[in-house]
Amino acid sequence: MATRRDLIAALSQAVGNEAVIWRPEDVRAYEYDGTVETRLPHAVVLPETAEQVAAVVAACNLLQVPITPRGAGTGLSGGAVARKRGVVISTARMNRIIQIDPINRLAVVQPGVANLAVSLAAASSGLFYAPDPSSQKACTIGGNVAENAGGPHCLALGVTTNHVLAMEVVTADGTLVRLGSPTPDIGPGYDLRGAFIGSEGTLGIVTEVTLRLLPLPASIVTLLAVFDTIEQASESVSAIIGAGLVPAAIEMMDRVTLQAAEAGLQCGYPPDAGAVLLVEVDGIADIVEEQAGRIRAECLEHGAMEVRIAEDDEERERLWKGRKGAIGALGRIAPNYYILDGVVPRSRLVETMAVVERVSAAYNLPIANVFHAGDGNLHPCVLFDDREPGARQRVLEAGEAIMRACIDAGGTLSGEHGIGYEKQQFMGWLYSDEDMENMERLRPVFGNEGLFNPCKILPGGTGCGEMAHDAAAIRAAGQDAYV
Amino acid sequence: MASEHSHWPLLADAPADEDLSRCVHCGLCLTACPTYLVTGKEMDSPRGRIYLARSVAEGTLLTTPTVERHWDLCLQCRACETACPSGVPYGRIMEHVRAQVAEAPQSDPVVRRVRRLVLRHIVARPRVLAAAALLPRKLAGLLTRERVAKLKPKPLRRLAGQIPRGQGAPVRPGFELRPAGQERARVALLTGCIMGEVFGEVHRATARVLARRSIAVEAVEGQGCCGALHAHDGDLAYARKLAKKNIAAMESDRFAAVVVNSAGCGAAMKEYDDLLAADPKWAARAAAFSAKVRDFSEYVAELGGEVPSQLETRVTYQDACHLAHAQRITTQPRALLDAITGCQRIETAGADRCCGAAGLYSVNQPAMSGELRQRKAVEIAASGAQIVTTANPGCHMQYLAADAESHLDVEVLHLAELIDRAEAAAETSR
Ligand SMILES: Cc1cc2nc3c(=O)[nH]c(=O)nc-3n(C[C@H](O)[C@H](O)[C@H](O)COP(=O)(O)OP(=O)(O)OC[C@H]3O[C@@H](n4cnc5c(N)ncnc54)[C@H](O)[C@@H]3O)c2cc1C
Ligand code: SF4
Ligand code: SF4
């Protein structure tokens, strides 16, 4: 087994002294991501090139040290938390947009580029990058690829995998390979690009991505429909989709969320509404107008008190600012939240929301709801205070009850945040042992013999034998801890 | 309140646990943070700095020189507050963190001590400061643009270049300007510490712009330094002392508003209520006072009415952090510029990103400050602007430095100077 000293020497060799973080107080800032789970890594590296990434991976493999890739650490399933400690590879310095190609409508970017930065850079060519996670200001393209991220506008346009053409990756064993092809069609051969997307950083590290860009819509109408109850809003969603309308986005927010968002972001939401739908249609002006009219009618018919249409870009932006900041804004009403990511068939929305309400009452935990209603992708956010003894356990139990209800309704465990750290024990609800063993076989194909982002996605998967020490013990051991 | 396990050495001014726990580590602030964008290190991000503070507060981490370095590298620009959906009061957290560092420093104790003494005994003392400002003012008279441009080496050129030129005599308490016609209202003007000494023309321009709108401007005696620099340095005790002095001097009902043309001072004065909230004798007075404080652009926009103005130029407005992020004022200055006939305003991508001046930051952290200045220089050069305008003395000098350092060939003006110039031009052309 290697000592910390050996490890740091090897990493410095790979990326240079300045790009290795190892002081105990420094690595402290890498023990978390957007979830509540924490684990201290031994060291963090900040490579700038694919070659440096490959060198780090090779060094870690040689020393048998676990590796965890990290983008912006906005992940909501603990994916970037170094569950077995070891080395975190941060892409924060790989943040160059290499090329915007307006003719072929594609962008070539380094993995640490923020999602929104791509659309901003493409805007002058009249193009944009479609997947728009609510965290898009900060989350990275590499993290999006790893989680197969979605966003409000993925209802009509599809999620990350529909917009990634090709990738350069360093596989878990340190080999630099290309996946996919920068052409409109997936190239010949196995679609390993598809297998890699959504693999939550367990197969390798993305070092360059070629993204499809779309032309900015000519016309956009944004509607805010205000309801008394979540049921009415849910029924309106079914009605809109049932009528054959395909809005670009249908987002729902409940009362708790609305109040938090309005308090923090002043976005013009009615704070006393029971629920709102934020609906957007885009495309050719005439069609957009017509569709917006029909959506408005459906909402009113299903009990909307009011349907507001954004008058200008400024109002539109304000409405979206509230939605995109809504989850963060929950920090105003509780020090911690545990956000779930269940998916149910749209037709089961109403009853699943009722379960969420019952769980909230049973566990005496407030739950805020803000989600991609059009896809049936729920995000119940359980609000709590982690400093309260026993709170976290109760929260996890409440979360489990809700996940169970999603599965029972014919849904699934994750729409876009990934399985990551703590939802893996639920995988057995969905898949048979054979199913999971089959998935497991993909890891060695990319050279993952258990060191690469261990203990993620699959329960008891490769490398997840004995758990790493408890965080407190690690802190106590401090600098003397061995890898 | 700080928790009982905390490792904070100065409990009275410890960061509040409620403030720290408001951060849900979502990371949405990362890309707003200038220092994170430069170093790419989580410890140099808002979330990382808060997490370190929280760890100290919870008693799981000791403040080490390394931890202090990450806190010291913070610009206190508060761009993270604008980005944060959770409403984390980052500025307040960092001021209280700095108070802890100053109380029991693990690194650079002498530098910290000297800085505190300079702030208390030079910056906050008008007469001492006036004497200290004499040299730069004299130098400014000798240094023409052309002379500065020829200076070598670069650091010398930058240093000489950042001394404000053409600012005339100082404006000190006692200054007054009445409108030509009827007086619609009277406002108190903060002359400030360094501002009054080396930016006299900015104050006069401010007063003229207001006078054209029938507002009388009075810089009352008894006022002094606003205390912003002290608070940012964690010297909250002294900041409170200065706040009380200013409240007593300017709270009179005679004044419809307290107008401030330095974004950093304005932000601090709008937060006197927070600073003195725990002081029963002063809390209410401070709240009433803070409610009356207005930034120059905010006040002019509130007054409304159209004063003709005209200037053929291309200008870029660069937000002062403490205007954009602490006071959330971004539209008014732009609208005022857009109202000038012939003035073409160019928006740059990083307009609301910190220029690296950040109060004493350019002295404390010259490397990071220089990096941010150079990034701005690139953006300004690309914009093709002839004039860079901003609303804070520190930023003003940073852009002067950028101009000298990178041969930008731009004129740097305070927003009030630019508006005054355009309004004067419209007057003479009529
Ligand atoms: C307020 C908020 C709102 C959110 N809204 C949405 C939403 O609407 N839709 C959505 O899909 N998600 C959302 N998320 C979740 C999160 O932003 C996404 O999962 C995002 O894709 C994570 O990107 P990141 O750069 O932060 O990755 P990280 O959190 O750093 O990492 C996530 C995973 O990706 C892996 N990874 C990171 N970079 C690479 C790389 N270069 N190569 C290989 N693996 C890598 C990590 O190992 C980890 O497993 C939200 C999060 C927050 C905090
Ligand atoms: S945006 Fe706010 S809540 Fe989120 S990490 Fe930053 S400071 Fe914390
Ligand atoms: S105040 Fe500025 S430099 Fe400091 S953490 Fe916030 S954004 Fe970063």
Image (cartoon, coloured by chain):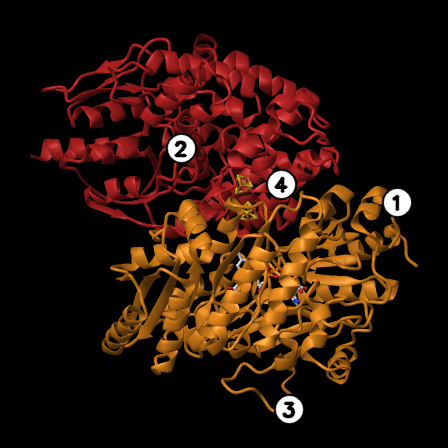
View extreme (left): residue? B430
The reply to whether the C-beta atoms of the residues labelled 1 and 3 are less than 8 Å apart is: no
Secondary element type, mark 1: helix
Q: Is residue A210 left or right of residue B252?
A: right
Badge 3 amino acid: Gly
Q: Chain of mark 1?
A: A
- Which sits in the foreground, A103 or A166? A166
Classed neighbour count for the residue bearing mark 3: other residues with Cα under 10 Å, few (<14), some (14–19), many (≥20): few
The quadrant of the image that shows the N terminus of chain B is top right
Mark 2 or mark 3, which is nearer to you?
3
Q: Any mark on residue B198, and which?
A: none
Q: Chain of mark 4?
A: B
Badge 4 amino acid: Arg
Instruction: Determine which residue is flagged by label 1.
Output: A480
Mark 4 or mark 3, which is nearer to you?
4
Q: Any mark on residue A189, and which?
A: 3
Secondary element type, mark 3: loop
**Spatial separation of the CA atoms under disc 1 and disc 4:** 24 Å
In the rendered structure, the colour chosen for chain A is orange
**Spatial separation of the CA atoms under disc 2 and disc 4:** 28 Å
**Spatial separation of the CA atoms under disc 4 and disc 3:** 47 Å
Q: Is residue A470 left or right of residue A323?
A: right
Badge 2 amino acid: His
